[in-house]
Image (cartoon, rainbow, N blue to C red):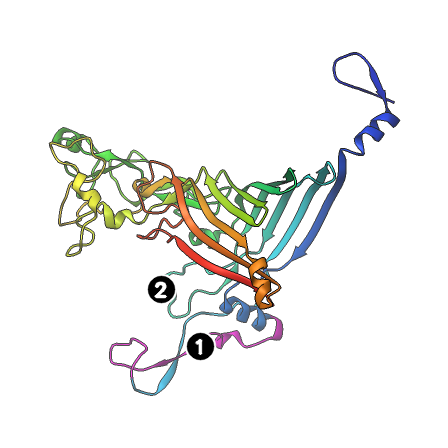
């Protein structure tokens, strides 16, 4: 057998090819893994249901909860405790089951100076434990935990590392990784439809990501009375108010117009870790990022509206709220009454949450030569900083895309330390 080499027209024998390849390729491994297991990260209630099903506990009285009596029925007070049923048992409940396959490749070149791995996984989970909402007419304890869904996850992970040296005193290491995943609900019993985002009828999460967003479509702000009059019936609509899309076209904006408006799954996540040493100095830093993710910026509740939290401080963004002289604003006009129900979940709160963060930086200096004088074998002085810099999408208006529901960013932390070995 012969292998083509470059484009010069000459051929390299298989024996010569292998001899030339061995000094370059130092490691190559194909991996395959398969496993089947349950899920231990479930609520105590579900574990008790499983215990009842296995050991035959009388489910009629499963999950009886002690409570005190009070005149308002609030399960509190000084009177003796009694019992109230909070959830029914389920004698046919069983463990969730996850079956996962992993395909991997490990590689190394130049005596492991350049190394890495690629992994692709497929994970299928069945009989997912959940507690679907029950109708109020069922009465007390009408919400047993059931095996209610199946889900498929697929993902790809890539990691590469390079160890290098310049001269006799400078050493460095670069390690980068990228990963991506996709998931979708593959099976969903009818009694579990309402446990996930959707209307339980023609809009269900089956075939969609478990991280799907479900809500209204915000279609800008009403600019004049003509736009208000031409729009579908929408309680509270008015000039400067958010216009919600009449998705089903029935002329009325209500709960039936909610739809799937995005997913919380990122396109991919990535990271870069760098370490370097020069004589007695060392430095390391970690960059970590997320790309192509939509987040629910819940902090807009506090920053964009003057009506949802009356009597409290308003966010500085309300200074740019819509007015007849500021029609280019995307922030609703100021009002003290939330007649338009603008706190309802909609695309108004969804924003691009991509970011790149300088997660950690550390600079150190080996002071062993000084420490030896006081009988210390090794000592190192270092200065460290965490979360020092974040680059985020310009369209994200909150303090921190990594914590979109918070009104405060993840804090920067500085540490001064000393490592010693006696």
- Label 1 sits on a secondary structure element that is strand
Which one is in front, 307 or 3?
3
Is 63 magenta? The answer is yes
Residue that mark 1 sits on: 64
Q: Which residue is mark 2?
A: 137
Which of labels 1 and 2 is toward the front? 1
Which quadrant, please, contains the N terminus?
top right
Q: Viewed as shown, does residue 143 lie left or right of 55? A: left
What's the residue at 88%, 27% (across, down)? 15
Q: Position of residue 297 (x, y in %)?
A: 33, 46
Q: Nearer the viewer, residue 233 or 363?
A: 363
Q: Secondary structure at mark 2?
A: helix
Query: Can you name the residue that lies furthest to the top here?
Result: 9
User: In this rendering, would 139 be left or right of 93?
Assistant: left
User: What's the magenta region?
Assistant: 54-77
Q: Is residue 7 above or below residue 302?
A: above
Query: Which of the marked residues, 1 or 2, is nearer the chain's N terminus?
Result: 1
**Is residue 93 shown to the viewer in this render?**
no
Residue beneath the point at 41% across and 59% down: 133
Q: Quadrant of residue 391?
A: top left
Quadrant of residue 97 within the rendered picture: bottom right
Residue at 51% across / 69% down in the picture? 44
């Amino acid at each position: 057998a012969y292998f083509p080499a470059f484009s010069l027209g000459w051929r390299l024998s298989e024996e010569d090819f292998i001899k030339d390849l061995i000094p370059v390729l130092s490691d190559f491994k194909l991996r395959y893994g398969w496993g089947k297991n349950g899920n231990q990260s479930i609520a105590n209630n579900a574990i008790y249901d499983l215990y009842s099903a296995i050991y035959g506990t009388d489910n009629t009285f499963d999950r009886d909860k002690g409570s005190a009596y009070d005149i308002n029925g609030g399960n509190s007070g000084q009177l003796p405790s009694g019992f109230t049923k909070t959830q029914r048992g389920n004698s046919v409940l069983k463990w969730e089951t996850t079956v996962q396959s992993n395909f991997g490749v490990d590689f190394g070149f130049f005596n492991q100076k350049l190394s890495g791995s690629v992994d692709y996984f497929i994970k299928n989970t069945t009989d997912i434990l959940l507690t679907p909402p029950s109708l109020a007419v069922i009465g007390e304890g009408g919400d047993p935990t059931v095996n209610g869904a199946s889900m498929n996850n697929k993902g790809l992970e890539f990691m590469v590392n390079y160890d290098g040296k310049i001269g006799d005193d400078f050493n460095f290491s670069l390690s980068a990784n990228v990963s991506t995943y996709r998931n979708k609900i593959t099976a969903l019993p009818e009694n579990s439809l309402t446990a996930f985002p959707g209307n339980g009828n023609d809009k269900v999460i089956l075939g969609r990501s478990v991280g799907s967003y479900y809500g209204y479509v915000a279609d800008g702000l009403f600019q004049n009375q003509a736009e208000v009059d031409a729009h579908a019936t929408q309680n509270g609509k008015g000039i400067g108010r958010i216009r919600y899309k009449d998705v089903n076209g029935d002329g009325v904006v209500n709960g039936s117009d909610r739809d799937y408006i995005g997913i919380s799954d990122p396109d991919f996540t990535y990271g870069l870790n760098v370490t370097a040493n020069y004589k007695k100095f060392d430095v390391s830093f970690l960059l970590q990022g997320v790309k192509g993710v939509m987040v629910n910026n819940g902090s807009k509740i506090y920053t964009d509206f003057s009506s949802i939290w009356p009597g409290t401080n308003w966010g500085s963004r309300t200074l740019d709220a819509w007015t007849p002289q500021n029609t280019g604003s995307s922030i609703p006009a100021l009002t003290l009454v939330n007649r338009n129900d603008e706190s309802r979940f909609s695309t108004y709160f969804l924003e691009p949450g991509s970011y790149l963060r300088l997660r950690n930086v550390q600079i150190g200096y080996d002071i062993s030569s000084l420490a030896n004088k006081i009988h210390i074998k090794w000592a190192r002085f270092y200065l460290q900083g965490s979360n020092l810099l974040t680059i985020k999408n310009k369209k994200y208006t909150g303090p921190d895309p990594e914590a979109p529901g918070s009104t405060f960013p993840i804090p920067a932390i500085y540490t001064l330390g000393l490592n010693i070995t006696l």
